[in-house]
Image: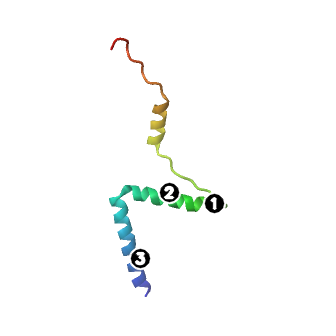
């Protein structure tokens, strides 16, 4: 009985993984759902990785744009 349940669970997980691979936004939405669920508990600490690329993007966004030459 346990082996049959494990087999069914693995098939469901494989289906879910395939759907998330086909739709990357689904994985992000699932992550946000998990964050909301964890944040609802008052006795837990949530640590999220922060992509370095996002930091670089924000850093570039704060830099002033180069000025255009007059008459161009």
Left or right: where 66 falls relative to 33: left
Spot the residue most to the right: 43
Judge whether 31 appears above or below 70 on screen. below
Which SS class for mark 2?
helix
Task: Kindly identify which residue carries mark 3.
Answer: 9
Does label 1 or label 2 sit earlier along the sequence? 2
What is the CA distance from the residue labelled 1 to the residue labelled 3?
28 Å
Counting every numbered tag in the picture gives 3
Q: Name which residue lies at 53% across and 52% down.
A: 48
Q: Name which residue lies at 45% across and 37% down.
A: 57
Residue 64 in the image: x percent, y percent? 47, 25
Does label 2 or label 3 sit earlier along the sequence? 3
Task: Kindly identify which residue carries mark 2.
Answer: 32
Left or right: where 29 falls relative to 43: left
Task: Kindly identify which residue carries mark 1.
Answer: 44
Packing grade of label 2 (10 A; few <14, some 14-19, many >=20) is: few
Packing grade of label 1 (10 A; few <14, some 14-19, many >=20) is: few
Q: Circles 1 and 2: CB distance less than 8 Å?
A: no
The picture quadrant where one finds residue 43 is bottom right
The picture quadrant where one finds residue 65 is top left
Which SS class for mark 1?
loop
Q: Nearer the viewer, mark 1 or mark 2?
A: 2
Packing grade of label 3 (10 A; few <14, some 14-19, many >=20) is: few
Q: Circles 1 and 3: CB distance less than 8 Å?
A: no
Please identify the quadrant where the C terminus is shown: top left
């Amino acid at each position: 009985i346990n082996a049959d349940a494990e087999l069914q669970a693995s098939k469901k997980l494989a289906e879910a993984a395939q759907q998330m691979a086909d739709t990357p936004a689904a994985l992000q939405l699932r992550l946000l759902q998990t964050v909301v669920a964890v944040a609802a508990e008052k006795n837990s600490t949530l640590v999220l990785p922060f992509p370095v690329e996002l930091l670089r993007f924000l850093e570039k966004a704060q830099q002033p744009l180069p000025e255009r030459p007059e008459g161009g």
